[in-house]
């Protein structure tokens, strides 16, 4: 594995994904800020949650980029379209599996079955995160595909 290439392009791809996600929220395409959702899992302070969530999101992006790199190395091939396909697969996994399971592990998120409480104030995302807006799946898919395209296009195999 090319550690320098992974660290550089994993970081760049993660920052791009985070920027696209924040841009989609700012443009009104989605109400979801996944870094804020992550941050609220570790602190009740919405102000601190944004910073903690951003740091967690960058860390998780680097971890996930290791999986992409392992696939590239295993296939002895890294290019933009393979990266994009892996990004699409990851986006679908996030939308279908992670978003559905999130209320069961998030300490401040209401569930589909019990609703909000004084402690659980976040709305559950629902299947495909549609509770955060009908364009949320498109924003998630676009940002994850971009993540994969950047990694696939610029990661240098050993």
Image (cartoon, rainbow, N blue to C red):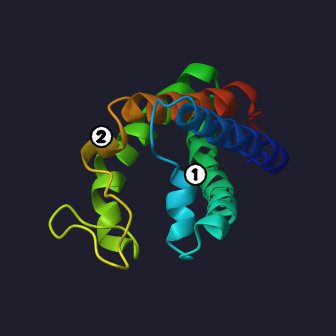
In the rendered image, residue 26, in percent from the top left (x then y), is placed at 58, 35
* 157 in relation to 106, above or below: above
Q: Residue placed farthest to the top in the image?
A: 81
Closer to us: 12 or 128: 128
In-image side of 91 versus 17 (left or right): left
Q: Which mark is residue 50?
A: none
Q: Residue placed farthest to the right in the image?
A: 4
Sort mark 2 into few (<14), some (14-19) or many (20+) by Cα contacts within 10 Å.
some
Q: Quadrant of residue 72?
A: top right
Residue that mark 2 sits on? 130
C-alpha distance separating marks 1 and 2? 24 Å
Closer to us: 68 or 137: 137
In the rendered image, residue 19, in percent from the top left (x then y), is placed at 67, 37
In-image side of 36 versus 150 (left or right): left
Q: Which mark is residue 64?
A: 1
Q: Say whether disc 1 or disc 2 marks the residue closer to the N-terminus.
A: 1
In the rendered image, residue 13, in percent from the top left (x then y), is placed at 69, 38
Q: Are marks 1 and 2 in contact (CB under 8 Å)?
A: no
Residue at image x 53%, y 26%? 84
Residue at image x 57%, y 49%? 67
Q: Quadrant of residue 131?
A: top left
In-image side of 58 versus 133 (left or right): right
Name the quarter where the C terminus is drawn: top right
Name the secondary structure under disc 2.
helix
Q: Quadrant of residue 58?
A: bottom right
Sort mark 1 into few (<14), some (14-19) or many (20+) by Cα contacts within 10 Å.
some
Residue at image x 60%, y 58%? 60
Residue at image x 71%, y 42%? 15
In the rendered image, residue 63, in percent from the top left (x then y), is placed at 62, 57
In-image side of 156 versus 79 (left or right): right
Name the secondary structure under disc 1.
helix
Q: Nearer the viewer, mark 1 or mark 2?
A: 2
């Amino acid at each position: 594995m090319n550690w320098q290439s992974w660290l550089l392009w994993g970081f760049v791809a993660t920052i791009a994904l985070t920027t696209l996600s924040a841009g989609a929220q700012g443009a009104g395409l989605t109400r979801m800020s996944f870094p804020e959702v992550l941050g609220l899992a570790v602190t009740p302070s919405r102000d601190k949650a944004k910073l903690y969530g951003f740091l967690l999101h960058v860390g998780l992006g680097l971890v996930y980029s290791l999986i992409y790199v392992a696939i590239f190395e295993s296939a002895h091939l890294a290019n933009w379209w393979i990266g994009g396909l892996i990004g699409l697969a990851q986006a679908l996994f996030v939308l279908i599996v992670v978003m559905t399971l999130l209320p069961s592990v998030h300490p401040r998120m209401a569930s589909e079955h019990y609703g909000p409480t004084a402690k659980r104030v976040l709305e559950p995302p629902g299947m495909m995160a549609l509770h955060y807006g009908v364009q949320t799946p498109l924003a998630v898919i676009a940002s994850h595909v971009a993540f994969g395209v950047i990694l696939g296009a610029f990661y240098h195999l050993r």
